[in-house]
Image (cartoon, rainbow, N blue to C red):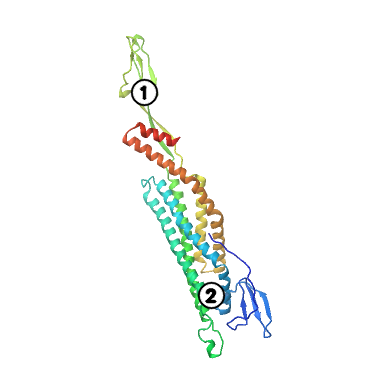
Amino acid sequence: HGLIMMKGSDFTSNKPADGSDETFTASGTKISYTDSGAVELTRESFSFSAWKDLDPSYIRSRWEARDESRAMMITAALFGAIAWFWLMVPIIQAAWVLSRGGKRKVGAHMLLAGLAICGGIVELLAHLMIVGMTNSMFWLARDFNLGYWGSSEADGSNEADGTGWRVLEMIHIVARGISHWVDAFEGLALFGIVVLLFYSVAKEPKFKVQRSSSVIVSSETEGGAEDVNDGGGGVVLTEVDDGAASTSPPPQSAFGAVTTKVAIKPTFSKCFTWFGLFVGMLSLVDFLADVLRFLNWKIFGTIAMAMNALLGVVFLPIWLLCLARQLPEATMRYEREEKRAAILLNGRRDDEIEALKGEMS
């Protein structure tokens, strides 16, 4: 859910109001002003040293660049917050179905639902806070006096110290630190969710045992009687001496128990669970890169950006589409099993049986 927009900016030949001899545009172009008033344009990339030194001219150029993409940044943050919030619903539904209504592996499925709830709420609140802070900082950069704090234009010096720009950039760095840790928790929560889904599906019973009975009735061969072996488990007719047909049920000792193993269809397909585990491993790498980027920002920051692009644009949407395709069928199968169990528990009633047959058809 991250979008990066790189766009050019319009150039202006007016000298900055803070009196500096150079400034930067949003696209990374440095504008140098000579003594004669001429303008020189040179292309420059992001300067880590100037940013670390809190150079007021460079910081001001960075805020001009951010202001151009402000609408896109805020929209992406809002969509990310809403997406994680609505992701809670299918994950909690999947946890309920896999736990068979809270009757199977309750602890693991409570943890699964808890990760979805915590992840969704934390992402929603954090992104809304970031949107609010971002709007406030853009307002400060656009309308407030950030160049003249140590000196003023009234004393005739007309020299800007740029202290306000330095303070604003430090506040922005702190706010970004909050968002980085929230994004790191997002990757960890997603890893936990897919691992628990994989574990729950792997531990589901693969077979169920169906019991049936066969009837073996032996009658005396005298008088034309014959041996009958009926595997249907119903009422057996035998011939007796007087030629009449007997409809009496066989004795209990005549029944033989037969058990049959029947394969159970898993709640989610094996392909889906293994693909989810692959997505979880990418999320774990994303989490580790987010944490380790403070040790080496260039290397781990690049890895984190690559993982965010792969997860947010390619693999995570595919996983969500697969979940959206299989979850309704799994829910219907679970509800049908619950209704069948309720019918068997309460006794067979014709109206309930017909309703169950109608749903199955």
Res. 55 in view: no
Q: As rendered, which of 104 and 154 lies closer to the eye? A: 154
Q: Are marks 1 and 2 in contact (CB under 8 Å)?
A: no
Can you say whether 260 is above or below 105 in the image?
above
Determine which of the numbered discs, if any, sits on residue 261 in the image. Answer: none
Residue located 57% across and 61% down the image:
306
Q: Is residue 48 left or right of residue 192?
A: right
**Residue 119: x %, y % from top left:** 44, 59
Query: Residue 311 is drawn in which quadrant?
Result: bottom right
Give the amino acid type for the residue marked by disc 2 in the picture.
Answer: Arg
Can you say whether 245 is above or below 294 in the image?
above
Residue located 55% across and 73% down the image:
63
Which is in the foreground here, disc 1 or disc 2?
2
Query: Residue 5 is drawn in which quadrant?
Result: bottom right
Q: As rendered, which of 57 and 13 lies closer to the eye? A: 13
* N-terminal label among 1 and 2: 2
Query: Residue 297 is drawn in which quadrant?
Result: bottom right
Instruction: Rate crowding at label 1 as few (under 14), some (14 to 19) or many (20 or more) other CA atoms within 10 Å.
Output: few
Q: As rendered, which of 298 and 38 lies closer to the eye? A: 38
Q: Is residue 222 left or right of residue 94?
A: left
**Residue 95: x %, y % from top left:** 41, 49
Disc 1 to disc 2, C-alpha distance: 88 Å
The kind of secondary structure element at disc 1 is loop
Residue to which mark 1 is pinned? 234
Residue to which mark 2 is pinned? 142
User: Residue most toward the bottom?
Assistant: 155
Q: As rendered, which of 280 and 5 lies closer to the eye? A: 5
The kind of secondary structure element at disc 2 is helix
